[in-house]
Amino acid sequence: MRAVVTRVLEARVEVAGTVVGAIAQGVLVLLGVGIDDRPEDAAALARKIRDLRIFRDAEGAMNLGLVEAGGGALVVSQFTLYGDARKGRRPSFIAAAPPERGRELYERFVAALRELGTTVATGEFGATMLVASVNDGPVTILIDTEKTF
């Protein structure tokens, strides 16, 4: 699984002109599911994101995790994180999980994050979405469960 995690002051996602998910302070998580990903990856990634110390403490240092900072997570599916653009001009998405498997692991990730005590809002899997955020910092972290970066 791959995630782009951005610390935000607020974020929201719209589908067909309707807001389907929104948070105040927290993280916007763009989540991609790979063809070889497993349920264990969803749980591990949820723990990693919950525990990332990317929020400021009273002294202004990044020492707090998501729950400690009182933040929420807006999770948006994004299979294009598995786009391979090393050859040609059109990215290949063969490393992305097929839609049914992608949905299953996306939902497992969201459930795991909730089980860890995180307030979670979501986009709509497979829909065309408009995502808006007010980045804080900006602080953006790339995470890959296979540790390729």
Image (cartoon, grey):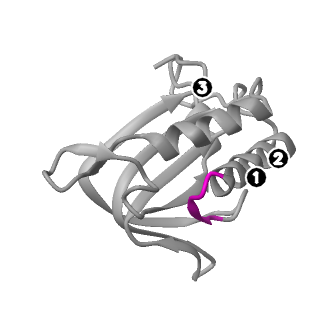
- Categorize mark 3 by other alpha carbons within 10 Å: few (<14), some (14-19), many (20+): some
Residue placed furthest toward the left: 59
Q: Earlier in the sequence, mark 1 or mark 3?
A: 1
Q: Which numbered tag is attached to residue 84?
A: none
- Labelled pair 1, 2 in contact (Cβ < 8 Å): yes
Residue highlighted by disc 3: 145
Q: Is residue 4 left or right of residue 34?
A: left
- Residue wearing tag 2: 104
- In space, the residues marked 1 and 2 are separated at their CA atoms by 5 Å
The amino acid beneath tag 3 is Thr
Q: Is residue 7 above or below residue 12?
A: above
Calculate the distance from the C-alpha at mark 3 to the C-alpha at mark 2: 17 Å
Q: From the viewer's perspective, is 59 left or right of 125?
A: left
Image quarter in which the N terminus is found: top right
Residue indicated by mark 1: 107
The residue depicted at 69 percent of the width and 31 percent of the height is: 41
Counting from the top left corner in percent of width and height, residue 128 is at 64, 63
Chain part drawn in magenta:
116-123
Does the magenta run of residues contain 120? Answer: yes
Whole-number angstrom distance, CA of label 1 to CA of label 3 = 17 Å
x 43%, y 53%: residue: 66
